[in-house]
Amino acid sequence: MKILNTAALTLLMATTALWGQDTLNIPEAVVQSAFSETEDAEPRNLFVLDAEQISSAAQPSLDGLLESVPGVDARQRGPWGAQTDLSIRGGTFEQVALWVDGVRWSAPHTGHHLFNLPIDPEDIQRVQVVRGGSGALGSGGVTGGIVLNTGPAMENGTEVSAEGGYYGWNRIRARHDWGEKATRHRISVSRAATSGYRENTDLNLTRIRYAGQEETEFGTLHLRAGGMSAAFGAQDFYTASFPQQFEQVDLWQTQLTWQHHISGWDVDAGLHYRTHSDRFELFREGEGYYEADASGVLTSADGPVPSWYQGANQHASTTAGIRGGARRSTDWGETLLSADFRREGVVSNRLGLAEYGRGDSSVYVLGDRRTNLDVGVGQRADLGRFTARALAAWNVNSAADGPRFVPEASLSLRIDETGRAVAFASARRSVRMPSYTDLYYTVGGAQGSQDLLPEEAEHLEFGYRLTGDLGDGYRLVLSQHLFHRWGRNLIDWVRFNGSSITEATNLREVHFTGQEFTLSARAVDAAAALRYFTVSLAFMEADETSTGFESNYVLDILGSKADVVLGFRPLEDWMVDVRWSAQHRDGGYYDPVAGMELDFEPVQLLGATVRWAPESLPIAAHVRVDNALDAQYVDIGNVDQPGRWVRAGLTWTSNKK
């Protein structure tokens, strides 16, 4: 920790000495319930991945793109998008909001499935990571949010790619863009599979998606519709006591949004619908695993399943909603109005109450439902070098004991006239309702609780940002953020010492303190040998420890994380992108084989992607290596991560220039 702090101070002094004369503007998050983009970035720690960085990564899943983002913890249970729990600033996977093309997505069954996306990374134009909870992110955005912008290209064309690699990995993908200037369409489809890096880690994943937009005199319409299906061995996913687990998930999602400028107001509205089904087998059924004997009992070489096991868990959740907002900008500021309403429900053979089930004739004999409303009104005031923002927001959930006020306020100061140096401070409040798994799950030594209270948190943050030039070739940005989060009633799954039960409970108060340093540079000349680099350091401390119990989520935080990513061009048609991350996780996990709790070990992850993309040919090739140092580690208890993994692929593009 001391070494990393010293390095951060060295970065600060070096960058201050290089502080130039030009301003490098950083765009704000495009969240429809937040303020619009301005010359000064929102005083919040925002990290952006643009289209070039996304394509350079040659990564088939969103979690891989975010692994090296400062402040983000991508805890993989299964690689390449099988399942990843994303957390921000020491929060849990349930405390992250997801926005896609102006619509808030949610996964009421469990946040484990929030990032089951029908979207190929190649179709994402920009990823924005908002670090810090906010009422503008909506219920569930307790520690931050991920904002994705996708859409059809403005040029017609077709792209096809194929990839293969270690452990039987193979992936094929195709997309086609067509239409006129005012009406654009895109269809994308992909299929990926791997035999797995160890027993019971196989994966089959299919995605299909349509994206279209039409500009009319009455506004712009955006239509998105897609589905994904994944089946994977879930070795040790949720418990190491019964390691041979299996899961299959299916999702369909569609949304229609509209944007228009009317009488000085920028207005938007949207409709969305998401359905997600999940089949989870605590004892995997099939050849080589558990098969039914003559009496119908599931049996394997290890013997029959326990008598209490009643077969696979089956759940289906739905989310439907409508949202709207309006902004009006004037010479001195901006006014914001927003409302987001959604209805969430689940039917299941394990979760919920009989009164909301589909009856005895259906496998879904239980269920539950609730409604959620997020409303806000805000004002931004530009007062000389000061910019003040205030948002009064409320969350109303039918399962809660009344509305919750989740305001935020911030103040930024342009230290110089051009905005090359900005200091800022903010205070915010956020809230999250328990998932249906938190409330009802009672299988395999796990016990949910219908008495859980909603999570709440207050946030206080200070920071500065310096921008400038390194000579004539690079734009630099240095930022430092210090933050404190007061968490109340945080929902965790814990196992108390001496108990065999893992139970959902509220941790009454846990406070988190952290700081983040980021130094990034991007070449002004697109043909520069060094295209970009980012160096970041993040530290986090909690004022509680898991003494006397095992914390599965709340206290297993990354105490320190250092990331370096850089891209360079050694030859005209060649590009190399390198990723390095050093992580030290607090907390530990129970190993049933060793019969004791083990501490998480520090890990260093090194990866690189080499691309050959000649401008004169319609083809490109890439080779990507992950975990090049072949580190043996776990992100989450007992789930071993893959060692060195190498993949290679070819891409053909019809309209390449």
Image: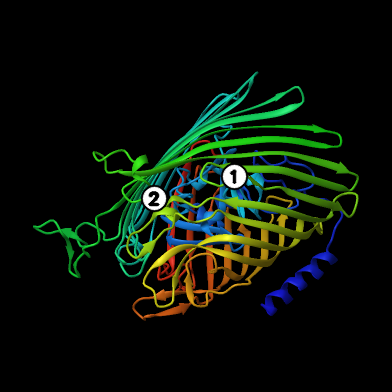
Say which residue appears at 64% left-offset and 53% top-offset: 133
Say which residue appears at 83% left-offset and 65% top-offset: 16
The answer to whether residue 60 is seen in the rendering is no
The answer to which image quadrant residue 575 occupies is bottom right
Q: How is the image coloured?
A: rainbow
- Asked whether 366 or 68 is in front, the reply is 366
Residue 402 tag number? 1
Q: SS of the residue at dot 2?
A: strand
Query: Is 157 positioned to the left or the right of 472 in the image?
Result: left
Say which residue appears at 58% left-offset and 47% top-offset: 139
Image quadrant occupied by the C terminus: top right
The picture places residue 504, in percent across and down from the top left corner, at: 45, 61
How many numbered marks have been drawn onto this rendered protein structure? 2
Image quadrant occupied by the N terminus: bottom right
Count neighbours of disc 1 (C-alpha within 10 A) and say few if under 14, some if 14 to 19, many if 20 or more.
Answer: few
Q: SS of the residue at dot 1?
A: loop
The answer to whether residue 259 is seen in the rendering is yes
Residue 418 tag number? none
Identity, as a three-letter code, of the amino acid under mark 1: Gly
Identity, as a three-letter code, of the amino acid under mark 2: Arg
Count neighbours of disc 2 (C-alpha within 10 A) and say few if under 14, some if 14 to 19, many if 20 or more.
Answer: some
- Asked whether 25 or 252 is in front, the reply is 252
Which residue is outermost to the top?
A: 217
Residue bearing mark 2 = 171
Vertically, is 154 above or below 26?
Answer: above
Query: Is 302 positioned to the left or the right of 132 in the image?
Result: left
